[in-house]
């Protein structure tokens, strides 16, 4: 799952990025409102963490512009203010949730999970296909014969595949959603992670497989 952080305080932005990547999110960071809108127009994101007070364009204006364009991306507003009126204004502008600084990491993660739940295509924290399950809270890929705790990018690739069973996911889309449109990584990195996951599925005795469609992408299919 890919998130955009729009926060002008660079130390906080960096801390949030570390926390979210540690919890297997893919993250991009913007440091003002104009840059945030540029990122949102150029890339696909599952959620936005949006600071209210930012240079060039404040968070409320960013949110109004997004909603005016029909962009319904889940938005969690961050602010140093605690007044009720500010929270109400943010929610009335189309924010999904509101968090006042300073905040607890566990609460931040819980609120992100809650606001993005509908984007995942499932209300459950566990995705299942065949005899394989992927737990979004523990990042474990498991079968009746065992389990593996997946690393960040492995988890994101597998989550994308299991959230869209039997659907062809273009390699370019996978690259953009997980590595980011401005990533320096070569597209061959996708194949490398697919290879890692195939080995784990084999070790788990999976009755599903990752199918490659030449020059197109990958899909998760039942073993015939």
Image (tube, grey):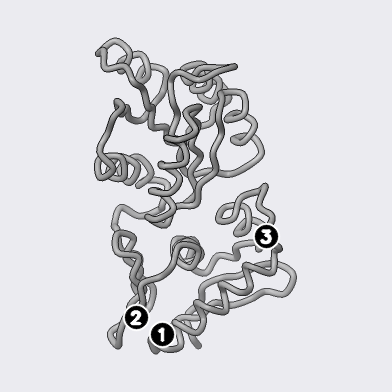
Which element type, helix, strand or loop, lies under badge 2? loop
Left or right side of 104 for 196: right
Specify the farthest residue to the right. 215
Give the residue number, with chain letter if any, for mark 1. Answer: 206
Contact flag, marks 3 and 2 (Cβ < 8 Å): no
First in residue order: circle 3 vs circle 2: 2
On screen, residue 196 above or below 92: below
Residue drawn at point x = 34 percent, y = 60 percent: 136
Q: In this view, does 172 lie above or below 128?
A: above
Disc nearer the start of the sequence (3/1)? 3
Crowding at label 1, few (<14), some or many (≥20) Cα neighbours within 10 Å?
A: many
Residue under pointer 2:
131
Foreground label between 3 and 1: 3
At 50% across and 47% down in the image, what residue appears?
27
Q: Which of marks 1 and 2 is nearer the N terminus?
A: 2
Measured from the top left, where is residue 90 in percent x and y? Answer: 37, 19
Which residue is most to the front?
11
Residue at the disc numbered 3:
185
Q: How crowded is mark 2: few (under 14 residues within 10 Å), some or many (20 or more)?
A: some
- Work out how far the residue at label 3 is from the one at label 2, CA to CA, in angstroms: 33 Å
Q: Residues within 10 Å of mark 3 (few under 14, many from 20)?
A: few
Mark closer to the observer (3, 2): 3
| SS state under label 1 | loop
Q: Is residue 124 left or right of residue 161?
A: left
Of 109 and 128, nearer the camera is 109
Specify the farthest residue to the top: 85
Q: In this view, does 185 lie to the left or right of 149?
A: right
Give percent across and percent down for residue 41. Answer: 64, 34
Q: Distance between the residues labelled 3 and 1?
A: 29 Å
Where residue 207 sits, quadrant-wise, is bottom left
Q: Is residue 102 above or below residue 204?
A: above
């Amino acid at each position: 799952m890919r998130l955009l952080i729009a926060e002008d305080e660079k130390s906080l932005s960096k801390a949030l990025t570390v926390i979210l990547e540690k919890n297997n999110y893919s993250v991009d960071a913007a440091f003002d409102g104009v840059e945030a809108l540029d990122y949102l127009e150029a890339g696909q994101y599952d959620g936005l963490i949006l600071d209210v007070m930012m240079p060039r364009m404040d968070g409320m204006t960013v949110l109004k512009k997004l909603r005016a364009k029909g962009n319904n991306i889940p938005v969690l507003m961050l602010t140093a203010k605690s007044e009720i009126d500010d929270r109400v204004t943010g929610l009335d502008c189309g924010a999904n949730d509101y968090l006042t600084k300073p905040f607890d990491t566990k609460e931040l993660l819980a609120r992100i999970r809650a606001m993005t739940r509908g984007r995942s295509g499932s209300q459950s924290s566990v995705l299942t296909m065949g005899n394989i399950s992927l737990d979004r809270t523990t990042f474990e890929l498991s079968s009746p014969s065992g389990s593996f705790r997946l690393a960040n990018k492995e988890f994101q690739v597998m989550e994308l595949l299991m959230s869209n069973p039997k659907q062809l996911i273009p390699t370019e889309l996978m690259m953009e959603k997980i590595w980011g449109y401005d990533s320096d990584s070569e597209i061959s990195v996708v194949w490398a992670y697919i290879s890692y996951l195939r080995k784990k599925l084999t070790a788990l005795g999976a009755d599903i497989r990752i199918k490659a469609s030449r020059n197109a992408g990958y899909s998760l299919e039942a073993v015939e």
